[in-house]
Image: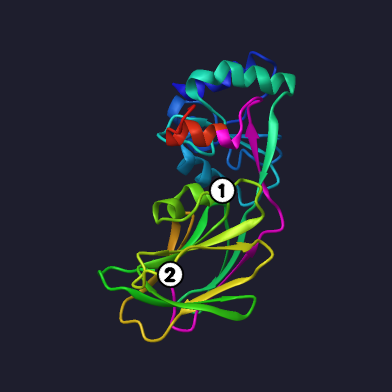
Amino acid sequence: MVLREVQGALEARGLETVIERESAGLIEAEGVEGAWEGADLVISLGGDGTLLDTVHRMGNCDIPVAGVNIGSLGFLTTCTAEDVDQFAAVLARGEHEIVERAVLAVQMKDAEGVMHMRMALNEVVLMRGETGRMISLEARVDGELLNRYRADGLIVATPTGSTAYSLAAGGPLIGEHAGVFVITPICPHTLSNRSLVLGDGSVIEVAAGGRNSEAILFTVDGRDVLRLGDRSVVRIEKGPTPLQLIRMPGNSFYATLRGKLGWSGG
């Protein structure tokens, strides 16, 4: 099992490991609740979804995170399961690189009037509910009206998230250090409604626009789906602390694009 392989490779090089309790149960080992507390590095085993789940469970961006890809795509992961020994050696020698990725700080008041604070590494999504009807959304940037969208939804993504849902919805790829956000409508009714790239110093506010017979749902990085109220406003801005991702030496964002997207030279 990859978990045993990673633990063994790290400990063979004198690196102390602590396993989160739920994961430890998979190999019948002792685990620790909140194992990341006090750690110098957190390792996630899975794909991008598992890494995102790990970051959200940690609840902060202060500890570097590495991903060992045993999933499918792995844009965010550090290495594959086949590279575990090399990965452990690089960590032991201190040759790994740390890449900072911007995150979104999100405030949202739900249909019950409860305020929710969230952090997003990939994106914030407002989308239609259970039926096939489009929804109306009003977006403002720094207090000024940007547009009233009639669409299946709206995505506000970081450069990291530009390779995720926003890309699938027709949004642009963005360099990892570009210092921007991108707003991408999902299947807009008007063809002129295209993605818009904004400086990451902008404050974006999204609310229901007009009368919606359809429920509007809200989610951050595909988690905790909540229902937007008629008077709810979702406020999105750059978070104060970037996420630190571990990268193997010699790897790069552009190499990842070539490899994952099958570009020439990949």
**Magenta span:** 227-254
Q: Is residue 188 left or right of residue 64?
A: left
Which residue was labeled with disc 2? 193
Residue 237, compared with residue 63, is above or below; it is: below
The kind of residue on which mark 2 rests is Asn
Name the residue that disc number 1 marks: 160
Residue sitting at the far bottom: 211
Neighbourhood count class around disc 1 (C-alpha, 10 Å): few under 14, some 14–19, many 20 upward? many
Image position, residue 186 (x, y; %): 39, 63
**Which corner quadrant holds the N terminus?**
top left
Which residue ends up furthest to the left in the rendered image? 132
Query: Crowding at label 2, few (<14), some or many (≥20) Cα neighbours within 10 Å?
Result: some
The amino acid marked with disc number 1 is Thr
Q: Secondary structure at mark 2?
A: loop
Camera-side residue of 176 and 67: 176
> Which mark's residue is nearer the viewer, 1 or 2?
2
Report, in whole angstroms, how far the alpha carbon at label 1 lies from the one at label 2: 22 Å
Q: Is residue 126 visible?
A: no
- Residue 229 drawn in magenta: yes
Q: Is residue 122 left or right of residue 102?
A: left
The answer to whether 233 is drawn above or below residue 264 in the figure is: below
Relative image position of residue 170 (x, y in whole percent): 41, 55
